[in-house]
Amino acid sequence: MKSSRFATFGEQGLLVPIPRRVTQQPEGLHVPDTAIEWADLPGLTIRGVSVRGHSHRWEGSVRQDQLAVGEIDDLLVCAVADGLGSQPDSHLGAALATRFSTAWPAVCDVISPGVAEFDCQEIATALTAEAEARGVDPVRLSTTLTFAAVQRDPVAGEDGSTHWRVAVGQIGDSPAYLLRNGTWTALSGSDAAADAELSNVVDPLPQHSRATVQQLELKPGDVLALATDGVGNLLADIPEFGDAIGSRWAERPLSPSELLYFVDAAVKTYDDDRTLLLVGFGDL
């Protein structure tokens, strides 16, 4: 990593992480440049940032990514969304999708054994209703959604080892990863879809509402990562980016500002919005 007041990976980014103009905010929803979520819960460590892409900063347009965290009964629910760049109100769709999914009682059913698909029609209906209230075509709110339901209390396996039950649902191509022993493994998204024969890679809300679901058992030391493709592309193409985050986390969980430093790095041609939400398992 080059010496700089900004993190850099690979070739120096053409657009530095400094906004060059005041953001032109859309009517009815203020979207800040950066959003941060974090918490230290018993056995669970949450760190998340969502930052405006350098191209959007240059243009003065808003961040179309969103993230959210919530609690429903005994579940921790986390979500990220990536509003489609081609749609003018996708930032609103991403915000509604993440907020709805992290406060939606029905999401408790996604973690049931054997669930491989989940009907998110209620989320699609909420987005459609918002579009109709604004007098616009619902397609203008098009967004991906990837969410995780995490059982707050770990369970003991037959061998006495501890694990947490987790379900990851995906609509669209925002990927999820597992960071284990310093290695990043795609759980969903375009890379994993090729292996798992998933069919929802480019199908966003609210037009599509069926989420593919993976059931996981995560152990102490594991880190679950939900991301938009602005981060997913970096993890896939720039190994030093993932190595930097993984090696720092191995020492101790990153602070929110440290995670922001890495996620907001300058990387040539990688100028999309970036969102990364990490859930670490095991006591600090």
Image (cartoon, helix red, strand yellow):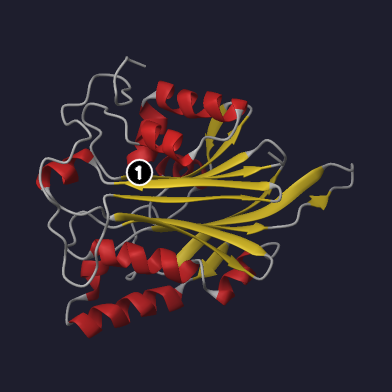
Tell me: residue 9, above or below residue 130: above
Q: In the structure shown, which secondary structural element does the residue marked by tag 1 occupy?
A: helix
In the picture, which quadrant includes the N terminus? top left
Nearest the eye: 252 or 82:
252
Image point (51%, 66%), residue name: 102
What x and y, as percent, mark residue 191? 43, 39
The single residue placed furthest to the right in the displayed view is 159
Amino acid type of the residue tagged 1 in the rendering:
Asp
What x and y, as percent, mark residue 242? 46, 28
Nearest the eye: 97 or 170:
97
Decide if residue 117 is in sight here: yes
Image point (51%, 71%), residue name: 103
Tell me: residue 104, above or below residue 282: below
What x and y, as percent, mark residue 125? 37, 79
Left or right of 270 in this view: 151: right
Left or right of 131 in this view: 181: right
Q: Quadrant of residue 152?
A: bottom right
Image point (20%, 81%), residue name: 134
Q: Crowding at label 1, few (<14), some or many (≥20) Cα neighbours within 10 Å?
A: many
Residue position for label 1: 229
Q: How many marks?
A: 1
What x and y, as percent, mark residue 108? 62, 70
In the picture, which quadrant includes the C terminus? top right
Decide if residue 208 is in sight here: no
Left or right of 21 in this view: 5: right
Nearest the eye: 3 or 227:
3
Q: Quadrant of residue 121?
A: bottom left
Tell me: residue 12, above or below residue 71: above
